[in-house]
Amino acid sequence: QMQVVESGGGSVQAGGSLRLSCVASEDSVRLGSMGWYRQGPGEQRVLVAITTRGGSINYADSVKGRFTISRDNAKSTVTLQMNSLKPEDTAVYYCGVQKIFSSRTYWGKGTLVTVSS
């Protein structure tokens, strides 16, 4: 069972920055897509940003130009640099990781990001 652990959440004022990190307990050669998702109060979990094993990256329209996802295959980690944060970015952020050739997503427990106006 692969373990996924996030870190780096916290509270920040609007316009500030936070950096989230996620590490998977699997050798990087066995990893497929790695991504960040978020779930606001009373909302469903939605994709924020994702990077494939081959290096393709996709962002939700709401974070384009403000968030940057990066992946370190040597360390089985993925990070999310969040700049120009807005109150509407407030949510629990989850890291989701897939093993190569598998559609199952392994989730971390989530980390809370709170942006105050």
Image (cartoon, rainbow, N blue to C red):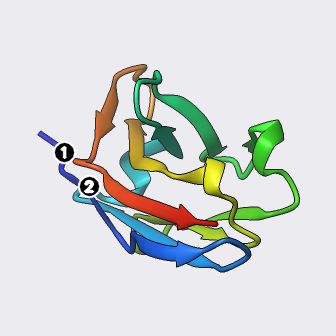
Looking at this view, name the residue that lies furthest to the left. 1
Indicate the amino acid at tag 1: Met
| Residue occupying image coordinates x 40% and y 42% | 97
Q: Amino acid at mark 2?
A: Glu
Between 43 and 37, the one lying in front of the other is 43
Please tell me in which quadrant of the rendered image residue 6 appears. Answer: bottom left
Q: Marks 1 and 2: in contact by CB < 8 Å?
A: yes
N-terminal label among 2 and 1: 1
Residue 73 relative to residue 24: left or right: right
Q: Where residue 51 sits: x, y (%)?
A: 64, 48
Q: Nearer the viewer, residue 3 or 114?
A: 114
Q: Position of residue 21 (x, y in %)?
A: 43, 70
The quadrant of the picture occupied by the C terminus is bottom right
Residue drawn at x 50%, y 40% as measured from the top left: 37
Left or right, residue 70 beside residue 64: left
- Relative to 103, does residue 26 appear above or below in the rendering? below
Q: Which residue is mark 2?
A: 26
**Percent of width and height locating residue 47:** 59, 34
> Does residue 11 appear left or right of residue 27 in this picture?
right
**Which residue is under mark 1?**
2
Q: Secondary structure at mark 2?
A: loop
Please identify the quadrant where the N terminus is shown: top left
Q: Could you say which is closer to the camera, residue 33 or residue 115?
A: 115
